[in-house]
Amino acid sequence: MSTDPGPPTAGRARSARARSARARSARWAGLVGAVLLTGAGWLGGALPGPPPPGPVGTPAGWAAVGCWAAGTVLLVGAWWSLRAGAPSTGWAYRTAGLWLVPLLFAPPLASRDIYSYACQGWAYAAGHDPYTTGVAAAGCPWLDSVAPIWRDTPAPYGPFFLLLAAAATLGGGLVGVLVGLRVLAVVGVLLAARCLPGLARSAGVPTRRAAWLALASPLVGVHLVAGAHNDAVLVGLLLAGLLVLVRRPGRPVPLLAAGVLLGLAVAVKATALVVLPFAALAAVGGRYTWRALLRDGGRLAAGVLATLVGISLLTGLGLGWVAGLARSGDSEQWTSPPTAIGFVIDYGLEAAGAAAGAVPVIRFVAMLLLAAFLIGLWWRAWRSLRRLDSGGQRGEDRRRGEGGRPGESGRPGEGRQRGKNRRRGEGGRRGAVAARPDADGGRSGAVPQRSSRDRATVPRDVTRARLALLGAGLALAATVVLAPVFHPWYATWPLAVLAVVATRTTWFVLPAAVACFLTLPDGTTLARYTKAPGAVAMTVLVLAGLVWATRRPRVRKGPFLTPSV
């Protein structure tokens, strides 16, 4: 009996068949999960009318929770199983779309925020100022569907979103408004989907992986589509603005257009502000000098400011939305690390007989830390880009010194041949990365490695885009971690940007997967039932992360922002 394993091609074929089978299993498991989540929504989701006393406060409550748990496990497991990348870019898009189909027909899931949007849009359309008048005082006809905590608070959203929400109320009754708001969310997701391949190619990341992580995430289907959160519009506008910048840096008209897109993102949610300093880095064309930054960054800023001023004047709401941001922290849950630490300190103070009041203090300290981190992150990105320019200039000068044009050696034709070989390896065009066809005929750039040898072969345009996009993604991640409030859909902000730039993914994909389990179909959060143990667990997790960060071996300094991310 022969023990010959057979030719290598046979082993590769078996491996390919196994990967294909795993991908098919993930696709259908995710679809079953989406159907179960839709069923959970109809059994006990955030349906119109007064909120139930709890997730099991309805006759079908336990059945809803059971379907929700099973569906979440299947959908998250399917997404996680292909976190290294779908078989192809087209396969990722088709599968993500397949999972969204049942969720399009689900009632609002995992949150009642959509009813707040509806009432705020109605209040604005009826002539009230949502930044000074709560929806209860405005007399919204759908007030009983709004979560009690948000009935008397001003709107924390920008004027552009209120304009969109008011337009959605033209649909007539509550059902029509909900459909209109979901359409807006789907448009935001589609805009993001359109921008993902271009951003991934610019940063040298496989499009099949970027599309899978950003679009097939259960957070997108459950919270952005079924929950119709305005974060879908925010993410779509952010990615569109960043794509214009990395494709057309230094050009006046595209810079203004990118400024308009990013300004609209800020006018949806002020969170987009943390991206602007890194967008200014992406806007610079040519060498990175302070003069170039002021010139190109100034054009981008002009587009942002003109958009914000124009929207404020168009809506007649001015800057009243800035004051409404202060009320977004009214909710206190341990899912926010600063809030969790404040809870634990308060427990200690109460045990010692002292007055509790650490939560606002820790939240304020966290905001200071966030500001310091963003400044340091931007400065490091700026220095990395300057070093990249300096290294490229020295290499060009050295090649000139060897005789001939840049890229040529002293012997005729030798440098030209090396340039052809290099361009072939980079995919055949300037700024592209080494690429291979996806199974569906698309292109998927190879992930650039971080060794010194690979740094020399990654095109400078790719590295420039990577540094700016990575800075934006890390800024959004830090904002989510240090913000006074965390909701699962907040994780979609950094997820969408990091999916197109990060070479290692577990560090941000794992928290996004965990966040999928934090809510129930009616909008109740698990933090409501686990305040003390959850706060302690989150505090321990933060301390463990700090210990790991301090003991982690220091990475050799070089011209790159974060070599191992």
Image (tube, rainbow, N blue to C red):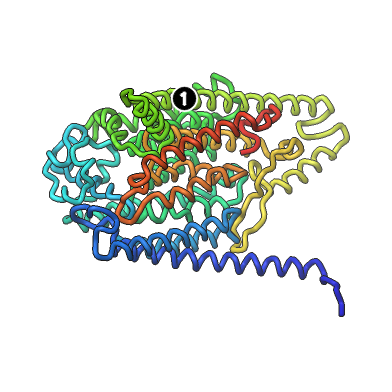
Q: x%, y% of residue 524?
A: 31, 50
- Between 494 and 88, the residue placed more toward the observer is 494
Which residue is label 1 attached to? 369
Q: Residue 214, relative to residue 367: is it above or below? A: below
Q: Residue at x 38, y 60 (%)?
A: 68
- Residue appearing at x 48%, y 39% in the figure: 242
Residue at far top of view: 291
Q: Is residue 393 above or below residue 48?
A: above
Q: Where, by quadrant of the figure, is residue 102 drawn? A: bottom left
Q: Amino acid at mark 1?
A: Leu
Q: Residue at x 51, y 49 (%)?
A: 196
Task: Give the class, few, some or many, for how many residues have Cα within 10 Å of label 1's Cα (few <14, many ≥20).
Answer: some
Label 1 sits on a secondary structure element that is: helix
Of residues 85 and 183, the one nearer the viewer is 85
**Image quadrant where one finds the N terminus:** bottom right
| Left or right: 41 in relation to 426 | left
The reply to whether residue 305 is in sight is no
Rendering coords of residue 311 (x, y %): 28, 34
Specify whether residue 17 is in view. yes
Left or right position of 373 against 393? left
* Quarter containing the C terminus: top right
